[in-house]
Image: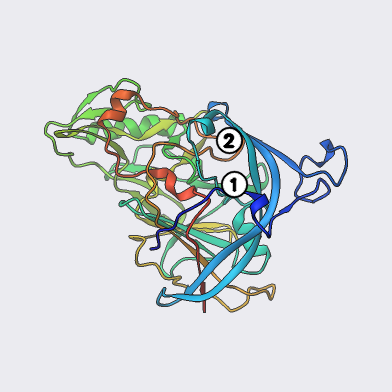
Amino acid sequence: MQDRDLNEYSPSRSLSSKHLSCSHRLCDTGSNCKTNKQQCPYTVNYLSENTSSSGLLVEDILHLQSSDGSSGSKSNSSVQAPVVFGCGMKQSGGYLDGVAPDGLIGLGPGESSVPSFLAKSGLIRDSFSLCFNEDDSGRLFFGDQGPIVQQSTPFLPLDGMFSTYIIGVEACCIGSSCPKVTSFNAQFDSGTSFTLLPGHAYGAIAEEFDKQVNATRTTFQGSPWEYCYVPSSQQLPKIPTLTLMFQQNNSFVVYNPVFVSYNNQGINGFCLAIQPADGDLGIIGQNFMTGYRLVFDRENKKLAWSHSNCQDLSLGKRMPISPSNGSSSNPLPADEQQRTKGHAVAPAVAGRAPQTPSVVSSQISQMVSYRQHWHYYWLLLFQLLSVFY
């Protein structure tokens, strides 16, 4: 890990920055420009808390430090990857409250996301992995297709297109009990702090959890969750596991699906950190992802996972020197070890933001010594490493 002083990005201070013109293929608002040579503006509107960002599209170089693929040791070589991103000039809503203070990195399937730029440049296979650990650390590996032994499930199209990372859950189990009618589709979204499930699945899972947990149900003022509890002692009782079942009997076990609150004496309470979603599409949020190396394999259109503490990661699968199109294949892991703390929740996919409240009540905030500060992963200014074979 390296501690670095990070400065606010300014195109005017970067010798390699380029403004995109309105005639550029990535300029979606080009039809609104007065001339083709005008700088391309962007506007992104999110559903959460009337949050938006607008500014100009900029192209610049992302510098990736390389390391040895087997040992993880750093080398002096580097990769220079051109990427296009929005340089915000006017923000509203959650951004004014400190959401994403260092930027928001785009990891979606669209052609303007960072993995898409890297893959199209021939620097990586079209895949990346995320790993979230319980100690507030995490890693992002560009080009990673995961270890040889891992479970997986295919991505599903939305309206005929693979525009986001949607998976199909066949059943949900609490402990060893699997309630009926708990199948649903969900977006796997690391940009959402907590999980939202369609109403039918949420009701069945929450009721079964309530039956199995050994604690007194209560309510916390301002809490976004319905199923909250006070333990009989200052210790957290045994929490039943929540298991998502997929095709071919693949399973994804969530060992700790609760939000724990603390006071000066210890644990003050806990809540099942799941909310009902608006509509039939759920969102698997970051609180379900801890302890896993999650591979978003866009090339093979599947999500894969394996247990990991995020510290023992190597690229596992030895990938060919060149992808099938003949371009080079250099996996680029990003080692994000910053310790920035906060309660902010990043807006997710534009037009499909989570219904996550932006503010937890002062009562909850005072109680919480939350061990998982979920927003760290999307900070734009990562410490980036790359791996060569």
Which residue extends farthest left? 233
- Residue 164 bears which disc, if any? 1
Which residue is at the front of the view, 302 or 116?
A: 116
Identify the residue at image location x=78%, y=44%.
39
Q: If the image is split into quadrants, where does the N terminus sit?
A: bottom left
Residue 159 place in picture, x, y as percent = 66, 41
| Amino acid type at image mark 1 | Thr
Q: Is residue 307 left or right of residue 199?
A: left
The answer to which of marks 2 and 1 sits earlier in the sequence is 1
Residue 142 place in picture, x, y as percent = 53, 63
Identify the residue at image location x=62%, y=67%.
80
Residue 201 place in picture, x, y as percent = 42, 34
Identify the residue at image location x=47%, y=74%.
67
Taking 99 as reference, is 59 above or below it? below
**Residue occupied by mark 2:** 352
Which residue is at the front of the view, 37 or 177?
A: 37
Q: For numbered disc 2, what is the local secondary structure?
A: loop
> Image quarter for residue 64?
bottom right
Q: For numbered disc 1, what is the local secondary structure?
A: strand
* Residue 209 visible somewhere in the drawing: yes
* Residue 280 visible somewhere in the drawing: no
| Amino acid type at image mark 2 | Arg
Which residue is at the front of the view, 262 or 247?
A: 262
Q: Is residue 146 left or right of residue 330?
A: left
Taking 216 as reference, is 298 above or below it? below
- Disc 1 crowd rating (10 Å Cα; few below 14, some 14-19, many 20+) is some
- Residue 18 bears which disc, if any? none
